[in-house]
Image: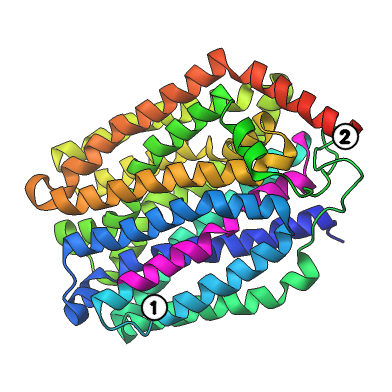
Amino acid sequence: MISKPWRVVWFLFFAAGLNYADRTALSSVIPPLRAETGITDAQIGLAGMLFLWTYALCSPFAGSVADRFSRSKIITWSLVAWSSITILTGFAHTVYALLALRVLLGIAESFYLPAAGALLGDHHGSATRGKAMGLHMLGLNLGLVLGGTLAGVLAEHYGWHLGFWLLGGLGLILAIFSKFLLSDVPKTSGTSAPVAPGTPAPAAEKSVVREAWRYCLRVPSFYCLLASAMAAGVASWIFLSWLPLFFTENYGLKLGAAGLAGVALYKAPVFIGIAIGGWLSDKMAMREARGRALLKGLSFIASAPFLFLFMGSPGFALVAAAMAISSLIRAIGLPSEHPLICEVIPARYRSTAIGIFNTCGSAAGGLGVLLAGIFKEDFGLATIFGVSSFIYIIAGLLMLLAYGMFFTRDMTRAQERDRLHQIA
């Protein structure tokens, strides 16, 4: 029988898949959407920016809510809300309605990840945290691949609306099972701090929002995490939002094939990378406390050179190979992302920290999507994709800076704060 901590992981695996499928399905239906609504490239970029900036602005508030109230209930209601909005998106017939629904989707989805990441940290200690959060990350990336592919195939044969109705309906069905699979960790007299590696952490008690922000913003390694997330967010969301259209315009792929190629080539290798990275992340953390930061920094830097190939307008086969190799290498560092936050931020502040983290990455990603839409006609997507490789190098260097200068001290400080809260 599956233990409670792993039941939570599996539920969040499927919820995460739908979360990312719903937000990225739009990128695979741009041609029929353009034909029906007359939406322009700049407006497509604006839609992406509105979603990501709304998501970014709401994430800190959502994180604070998840530090004060039941994380499992917040996850469930977020799932219901964003699934309902996805269904409504299928009924949109004007650009203005579409833009408004992207704003609402950003609000609804912003409550999921801070609560989900912190809940996983509650249920899993250092010995299993990388694997648990790696599986959750795998769900997110599976949603990217299947969401874009499903939306593109259905749009090609039945119109672009059906994919949104189907994805939203699946989310509402999944929400029914939350009562049986999702649960908070019982509170103790102390706080939400994990008491030992491998020991589930108790659920966060009500915390003062000001106290959480004050602590997070005094952690140097957290600043490096935020800056790295912003750099990576710019590059990642440019690829996620514009690759399907790039393959349609440059290689003549049909909608279904472009949706599959645009997302799968960038994200399918991530499955293998995450599987390796989750195991390797826990191994490196057991060998050296700050080892996850080294792994994540090197994965960014090593993945970047393969994207230079876009600058030379290569054939489809070469682009596919470069994308796959780059994504595989970069994905090895992904499972370390939220565990790093859990290790430098005390347990009772983790949802707030993840909310701030999401804000920075999403806001930067929204700017990247918008700028790509604006400069697409002047420079071309191939040039924009090639420049993104330098952005990934910057993200990696920031992680190595944190590894060399800040992580050891910040981790010790967070552990001491957890012990003090346990005694209190």
Residue pointed to by mark 2: 422
Q: In which quadrant of the rendered view does residue 300 lie?
A: top left
N-terminal-most mark, 2 or 1:
1
* Local secondary structure at mark 1: helix
Residue at far left of view? 378
Q: Is residue 122 magenta?
A: yes
Q: In this view of the protein, which residue sits in the foreground, 105 or 401?
A: 105
Q: Is residue 411 magenta?
A: no
Can you say which quadrant of the picture contains the N terminus? bottom right
At 55% from the left edge and 62% from the top edge, which residue is drawn?
Answer: 17
Residue 83: percent from the left, percent from the top? 53, 74
Residue 243: percent from the left, percent from the top? 28, 55
At 87% from the left edge and 34% from the top edge, which residue is drawn?
Answer: 422
Q: In this view of the protein, which residue sits in the foreground, 399 or 46?
A: 46
Q: State the mark number for residue 89.
A: 1
Span of residues in magenta: 99-126
Q: Is residue 330 visible?
A: yes
Vertical placement of residue 292 versus 122, above or below: above
Color encoding of the figure: rainbow
Q: Is residue 276 visible?
A: no
Residue 7: percent from the left, percent from the top? 77, 60
Give the label, 2 or 1, closer to the camera. 2
Left or right, residue 19 beside residue 69: left
Residue 230: percent from the left, percent from the top? 40, 38
